[in-house]
Amino acid sequence: DGLGLADFVRAALTNTCAIRDNAERKVWQRLHTLRAHDRNFPLDEIGDGTKGDGLMGRTKEARKQAQAGRRGGRKRIIGVLGCMAERLKEDMFEQGTADVVVGPDAYRDLPRLISVLAAPSLPNRDGDSGTQGAPSIPTERAVNVQLSLDETYASITPVRANPDDVSAFVSVMRGCNNMCSYCVVPFTRGRERSRDLESVVGETRRLLDEEGIREVILLGQNVNSYHDGRGGRGRNGSNGDGGTYRTSNDGFSNVFRARHGGGHRFADLLEAVSSLSPELRVRFTSPHPKDYPPELLSLMAERPNVCSHLHMPAQSGSSAVLERMRRGYTREAYLDLIADARSAIPGVSISSDFIAGFCGETEAEHLETLSLMEEVRYDQAFMFAYSMRGRTHAHRTMADDVPEDVKARRLSEVIDVFRRNVQARNEEVEVGTARLVLVEGESKRSTPEDRVWSGRTDGNKRVVFDDAAVPTEEDALAAAAAGAGLPDPGEGTAPGVRIGRGDYVAVRVTEARGHTLKADALCRSSVVGF
């Protein structure tokens, strides 16, 4: 009758992003939808969902009449969490859309804030201010947007939304010190602070041993600037008494200087996590190009289970624009890093971010971005038109002077260059090549009659392939040693095992379709065996 489980919740919490204006517009739309739903299906009318209670105990016609005549009653608590809450603070209470506003460092306070809002009105006690016996005024709003210098939520074990996933995120640090002129993250997430190395390793070990996770993604706003300064000797020889932070090369610099000191750096963390099991794939996101020192690239080359994929957000191909963005590097320094990475890690996959139409961007500067994309030939890219955010350096000191139609046209050109190059690169590099794929599940187009699997290579490229009985790794190695080779993919008569979620499967790529590769399954395999 139009009622679902969501109708009986007492509090609806919306986690938010503030990185672009479009994200915030979607949040406002969602909040208005939630409040409208609350007016149409009030808690006082619905009850708790049991038979004979509230709307659920009435006939369908009676429910309609009650809903149509309802103009008051107990509200659900609607909460806004995360970066948008931190950026707008009390402005989130506009138009009565939100009751509780909580920034990203105040989640531990949520139970208290909700209990305050949910507390019923009670008669005043003797001695209280106001008229004796009159009901107290309930709390209408609650807010906590205090940023922290040390909150990392290291002691909280996340509940995974989908226990069947073969991958899991592990947060290793929070905040950002980079202060790029376009970015609101330092103002919504605060300063960088890192979890201690042992807690990250412990959480990953639990995911591996207790939940059977096959891949872990180390997560942070600037993940490769991770620094556990609590002591211990690092991979580059630093210890608790000293140590020097190193950028990717001499062409990179920092706006924020307090990065020195002993302890563990990101390479140390990556080494410790990847040492838990040679069959545990390890990825990380989102990094900054300045934080790829030689020892990190060397570790990635040494460890087969550390995925050969580097995210290197360029944002622009123009040194002048990069300077206005306060990125801390030039086009030339960035290209030197790309060359170093491809030399250290043969076959590495490289992805990037690009912003079209930043403040003052000229047509010549835009063309420099296109030429950078042509030169690097990225495997993946995330591309957006510039959206000015309040409180940022650009908002305070620059004009958003590139017309929206010009931004849209430049973004379209950036996307076109990327798509053309990624198709050509995949046809040259991937087609005909054997890759190791971690099977994540069935493809969206899979059917019970025609099952198709989907997974990713260690270069983070999506691969789809038909279900088949394939040889085990042992049988494939024995056949290779005997000179017999592998049976033809999909032959059907070859003995073998069925493929399942969480398996490593060796495939041969047969076709490139933009971002997605099509392949034939060869055999079940492993990180070490492949």
Image: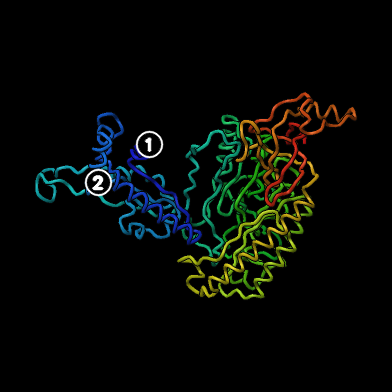
Quadrant (top left/top right/bottom left/bottom right) for the N terminus: top left
Tell which residue pokes out farthest to the left in this image.
132
Q: Which residue lies furthest to the right in this view?
A: 483
Q: Is residue 176 visible?
A: yes
Q: Position of residue 159 (x, y in %)?
A: 48, 37
The picture places residue 426, in percent across and down from the top left corner, at 75, 51
Q: Which mark is residue 5?
A: 1
87 sits to left or right of 346: left
Residue type, mark 2 in image: Ala
Name which of mark 1 and mark 2 comes first in the sequence.
Answer: 1
* Foreground of the two, 352 or 58: 58
Give percent across and percent down for residue 287.
62, 54
* Mark 1 Cα shell of 10 Å, populated few (<14), some (14-19), many (≥20): few
The residue drawn where x is 56% and y is 65% is 385
Which element is circle 2 on?
A: helix
Seen at 28% across and 43% down, the residue is 42
- Is residue 236 at least partly visible in the picture? no
Q: Quadrant of residue 176?
A: bottom right
Question: Mark 1 touching mark 2, by CB under 8 A?
Answer: no
- For the C terminus, the quadrant is top right
Residue 66, picture quadrant: top left
- Residue 2 lies left or right of residue 344; in this view the side is left
- Which residue carries the number 2 mark? 68
Q: Where residue 272 sits: x, y (%)? A: 65, 40
Three-letter amino acid code at disc 1? Answer: Leu
Position of 21 with respect to 109 (left or right) is right
435, 231: nearer the viewer: 435
Q: Residues within 10 Å of mark 2 (few under 14, many from 20)?
A: few
